[in-house]
Amino acid sequence: MSFFSLVLLALALSIDCFTVCLVFGMQRSAYRRALKPGEKDPFPSLGGTAAKAGLVFAVYHIIMIVLGWLLGWGVNAIVARYDHWFAFALLLGIGVKTIIDGFNARDAQLKVHSMFDWKSLLLMGLAVSIDAFAVGISLKMIEVSLLEICTVVPVVVFLASLFGVFLGFHTHKQMKRISLPAVNLIGGLVLIGIGVRILIEHLTQIGH
């Protein structure tokens, strides 16, 4: 596999990470806009939070690729029966929680923290990296270097996540009428949508 083909594969794997981070960037912008005059943003810097998300997603992709590479094709038949349901359940749960927290008036910080507290971030990282397991199996079959895969894919995933956060943040700044609860509603629906897409894709593959 050429380096260019490997980069394209990495870009395909990073689409869900980019989408999640895009919504999170919008969420952070909406939260800052909702702050009262003189009120400080209690959350870490946008760059630090974006780097945290990118790092988690990148590490998960490394882990899943290596597991697929080591465990091989025999395990894939077992994993393929349940991985899409597992990813769907995780994203559905986080998506619903994001929507509910977005309309929770008791704690405004929940509205922006719901997607990217450590617990949610780790669960989302697992859900959006499951496809990397199958990639690890497939690339071993065509004898692609594991070191090369585990270098290119995480870097692309990390950069795509960073870009998604900053793009979402600055895009929302141009959309002044979108409130924080509305952004959380969009974010929750996006997560649920990603879960549904994963489920449909895998069920369609099984049907064929």
Image (tube, rainbow, N blue to C red):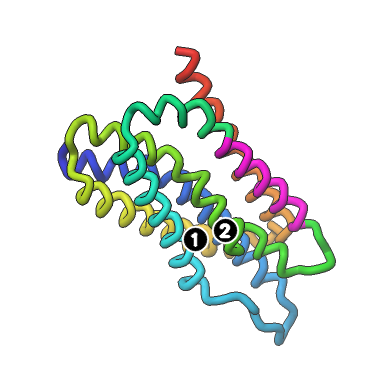
Badge 2 vs badge 1, beta-carbon distance below 8 Å: yes
Q: Is residue 11 above or below residue 76?
A: below
Q: Is residue 74 left or right of residue 99?
A: left
Going from the N terminus, do you reach mark 2 or mark 1 first?
2
Horizontal and vertical percent for residue 53? 48, 61
Q: How many marks overall?
A: 2
Q: Quadrant of the N terminus?
A: top left
Give the magenta range. 86-102
Q: Tag 2: residue type?
A: Phe
Quadrant of res 193: top right
Tell me, for residue 165, which label it has, or none. 1
* Residue carrying label 2: 24
Residue type at tag 1: Val
> Residue, x 25% and y 35% (percent of image)?
139
Q: Position of residue 106 (x, y in %)?
A: 84, 67
Specify few, some or many for label 1: CA neighbours under 10 Å numbering under 14, 14-19, or 20 or more: many
